[in-house]
Each structure stands twice: as C-alpha cells, then as structure tokens.
Image (cartoon, grey):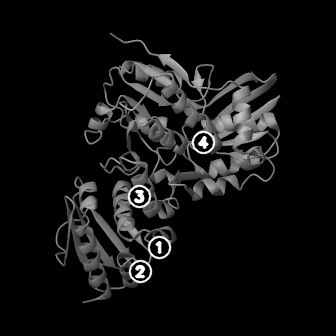
Amino acid sequence: MSALGEALASFRDRVNKDARLRDMNRDWSRLIRVEPSDGTEAFRVSYQEGVMEVDRTLEGSFDIVLRAPEEVLARVFSGEASPTEPYLDGSLTIQGSQEDVLRLDFLSLMIWGE
Amino acid sequence: MKEVVSVSLGSRRRDHTARATLLGEEISLERRGTDGDLEAAHALIRELDGKVDAIGLGGLDVYLVAGGRRYVVEDGRRLTEEAKVTPVVDGSSIKNTLERDAVLRLAAMGVIGESTHVLMVSGVDRFGMAEAFARVGCQTIYGDLMFTAGIPYAVKSLDELAELARKILPEMSRLPLSMLYPQGKAQEVEPVPDPKFAPYYEEADLIAGDWHLIRKHLPTWLGGKTVLTNTTTKDDVTLLRERGVRTLITTTPVIEGRSFGTNVMEGAIVALSGKRPEELGEEGFRSYLERLEAGPTVEILEDPA
C-alpha cells in the first residue's frame, strides 16, 4: 500500500474509534476525493454520519476535492504535518465550501492536535 | 479632546461616532468598519498611528483564552504591529475585568444563579464571562464549535473547552479569521435560524457572548429570554424586541443608543490614562472602571404583543 493509502487507513481507524468525534460530526456526510497532484493513485474518502471509509471508487461526483503532492497528503493524514501550513502556502488546495474546509481541518486537528 | 478610533472588520453600515465626557475629559469614540477588508484595516491603522490616542480592533480578536492558555490570532497580531506609536487594543482587558464582573454582579443581584441555563455562543473569545458563569454555577453550554465551525456539539464545561482549545486553536488561530467569524457584509444578512442550534437557544434562559455570533442563527422567537452582549445598535435592539427577547443586558456602557465594543471601552481608558495597556495592567483597568462606575446596562424590552 502507498504511504498515502496507509496514512488514510490509519486516519480512518482513529476517526472511527473516537465516539465523541462521531457524535460531533453526526450531521456531516460528504464524499471526498484525495488526489495526489503528482500522478499517483487517488482515493475516495466517504464520511457518513460520523463513520469514515476509504476506497478507490472514483466515479461520480465529490463534495470536496483535496489536491497536493502525495508526500504532503501522506504527511497531513498521518499527523506528521498540520493541514494549515500547506493550505496557507498553496501546496494543498481544497475544492469545497468554506464550511466543509473548516470541518475537515477540525477533524484532522481533533485526531492529531495536542 | 481625546480620540479613540475602533478599526473594525465589520460592516461599514454599523459605523458610528459619539462624543462623551468621561472623568471630566471630552472624548471622541469612533467606529470605522472596513467591510471585512483586512488590507484596508492595515492601511487605516497605519494612517491613524500617531494621530489618535488609542486604536481599537473590532470584528476580530488578538487573543483567545481557555484553560489558562492564551492563543494568538495571527490576523489580529499582524494588525497590532501596524501601529508604531499609538496603542492598539482588542478589548481583552475589558473582557477580563468588566465582563467578568458583570456576570458576578448579575449573580449578586439575583438575575442569574445555579438554576440559570446559559447558552454562551463562544467562550474562548470572552474568557472572563465564561469563567464567571462557571464560578456562579450556571448551567452553561459553550457554543464555540457550533457558532464558529457549524458543528452541532455542545461543550458543557470549561475543562472540555480547554481540552478542545489545546487541540484546535494553535492551528485554527492561523487561519483567516473570516473563516470563523462573520465579517463585513456577513454582518448585514438576515439571521438564518438553524434547526441544529434551535434547541440550544430554546433551552437557554440567558444567551450570552458576541453579538454577531448570537445573531447569526437567531431563532424567530425568543420569548421571555435574556441576552447578554454588547455592540448592539438601535436596529439590533429592535430585532431582539421583535423576536420576543424580554431583557437585553449590555456589558459596556450605552452611549447615544449604542453599546460600544470592549475594544472601544479599553481604548477609552488607555486614552484617558495616557498609558499603554501593559502599563495599566488589570489593576489599572479596574481602577478606571470603578471611577467610571462602569457596569452592565439592563434594558427591559417591551413585548411586541
């Protein structure tokens, strides 16, 4: 499995184990495309009522698209780097509503924050 | 005459100038909005630096506080650094003194107590008030996640608020503040009631905190409830009256129908004292607040029926 695949699997496991996080995000159902900008394989992250799944089903439309070099995406989802820095310097682009961007950032910080 | 100008990221439509005589000194208190334009706010502070006695920052915070830790909001910090001569204040000292004391005073008056259900729309930006509600023993819900990130989760203790703040604020405080707080034109749109948050308004006896966050999802009916906030204009008071709010309590003095922001109040004290905020310290601010006889203003709003 690629570094990004491993990072996403680890992130998914942590999110799904956290009962409070599931409760916080019970209203939020989104399909997210995680797309390395350097040509490596993309992933679909499905977040439905607090439960996250990761697979390679890339047909159809997505609510949010994350795009960055694979190494950046892997570092963000593995908690080695925060999403804020690459988001602010433009190396991570996020297509989606501002509220969704904020929610994703929140999810990540709740898992990897202090 | 002393001059205080509050540079706000809020709507220009809320601009206002008032003159008051405080401790025998005439003072001009002006609010200038920039419609959410951060660059315009930077330029305005540069223009005012050295020409006025104090500059306030409105529509954003420089510091957020939870669990004894202070988190610096990058957008706010950068604005404070624009002024090289004139002191720049964000209202933190007033939130730590006047607003904290306002809650304790309301408790002493019997207006609130252990049985009071409070919805505090955001605790980290009004830490004095948040801590005071906990001290009084009010049944308090902190709506920080709800009202800033749209997450329907009620934080029920200061400890949990501090724990969440440790996780998210070091990073979120670096994001553009417009992502977290209604600025500019967003302050002019009609409130949008949200069924996700309606039960929390419904269960509360008292709704407290930042006015724009309270207003953002203001339900169509708030019969008999009390709102504790500031920066309300005459139009805002009309809105609350129409929605059935029984009592409006403002923490800052009302001058010409407008309760000014904590940053304006802090700027006024800095201007009157001729000292920088760090020189005044908590004791200095308390001393001025006592001399000004500053305290909450309670307004009973008439029932529209």
Query: CB atoms at circles 4 and 3 under 8 Å apart?
Result: no
Q: CA distance from mark 4 to mark 2?
A: 41 Å
**Mark whose residue sits in front, 2 or 3:** 3
What residue does disc 3 label?
A: B164
Rendered residue at 38%/66% (across/down)? A94
Q: Which of pointers 4 and 3 lies earlier in the amino acid sequence?
A: 4
Q: Residues within 10 Å of mark 1 (few under 14, many from 20)?
A: some
What residue does disc 4 label?
A: B96
What residue does disc 2 label?
A: A72
In the depicted structure, whether residue B17 falls above or below residue B209: above
Name the kind of residue labelled 4 in the image.
Answer: Asn
Rendered residue at 30%/37% (across/down)? B200
Name the kind of residue labelled 2 in the image.
Answer: Val
Q: SS of the residue at dot 4? A: helix
Q: CA distance from mark 1 to mark 4?
A: 35 Å
Q: Chain of mark 2?
A: A
Q: Which of pointers 2 and 1 lies earlier in the amino acid sequence?
A: 2
Q: Position of residue B144 (x, y in %)?
A: 41, 48
Q: Does label 1 lie on the same chain as label 3? A: no
Query: Is B188 placed left or right of A35 in the picture?
Result: right
Q: Does label 3 lie on the same chain as label 2? A: no
What residue does disc 1 label?
A: A86
Observer able to see residue B296: yes
Q: Chain of mark 1?
A: A
Give the quarter of the image for residue B140: top left
Q: Position of residue A80 (x, y in %)?
A: 42, 79
Name the kind of residue labelled 3 in the image.
Answer: Leu
Q: Does label 3 lie on the same chain as label 4? A: yes
Q: CA distance from mark 2 to mark 1?
A: 8 Å
